[in-house]
Image (cartoon, rainbow, N blue to C red):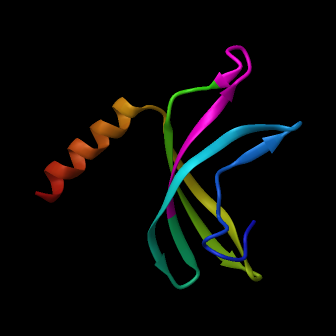
């Protein structure tokens, strides 16, 4: 949990390993107690001993008791899926 929008992250460490490495993030919307963020990240693959391909996530946070708490999330599991979402949104908003 974070007290600020800037402190929100998707990074996750376990047993000394950064299992989820945040590559970038962007603020999509902020209003009242709610924030929507988009993250670009990679997950650690123990078998390959390397980070996997880029993935993306949209997460909604609500500020309660002075800290942001995640309330919902949507993961985009690969670049092809991300491109398809972009294509559909471009068509809908043209």
Where 58 falls versus 21 (above or below)? below
> What residue is shown at x 75% (from left), y 65% (from top)?
1
Left or right of 4: which side holds 60? left
Q: Nearer the viewer, residue 51 or 8?
A: 51
Where does the image place residue 58, in percent across and percent down from the top left?
A: 49, 54
Q: How many marks?
A: 0
> What residue is shown at x 50% (from left), y 37% (from top)?
55
Where 61 falls versus 78 (above or below)? below
Where does the image place residue 14, in percent across and percent down from the top left?
A: 84, 39
Where does the image place residue 17, in percent across and percent down from the top left?
A: 81, 36
> Of all residues shown, which one is farthest toward the bottom?
32
Left or right of 14: which side holds 2? left
The image quarter containing residue 47 is top right
Where does the image place residue 74, in percent across and percent down from the top left?
A: 51, 48
Magenta-highlighted stretch: main secondary structure? strand
> Of all residues shown, which one is farthest toward the left?
94
Where 49 falls versus 17 (above or below)? above
Residue 44 part of the magenta segment: yes
Report the span colored magenta: 37-50
Residue 64 part of the magenta segment: no
> What residue is shown at x 48% (from left), y 77% (from top)?
30
> Of all residues shown, which one is farthest toward the top?
47
State the quadrant of the C terminus: bottom left
Where 14 falls versus 64 (above or below)? above
């Amino acid at each position: 949990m974070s007290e600020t929008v800037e402190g929100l992250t998707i990074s996750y460490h376990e047993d000394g390993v950064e299992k989820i490495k945040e590559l970038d993030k962007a603020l999509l919307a902020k209003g009242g107690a709610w924030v929507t963020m988009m993250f670009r990240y990679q997950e650690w693959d123990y078998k390959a001993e390397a980070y996997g391909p880029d993935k993306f996530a949209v997460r909604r946070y609500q500020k309660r008791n002075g800290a942001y708490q995640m309330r919902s999330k949507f993961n985009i599991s690969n670049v092809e899926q991300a491109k398809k979402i972009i294509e559909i949104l471009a068509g809908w908003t043209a």
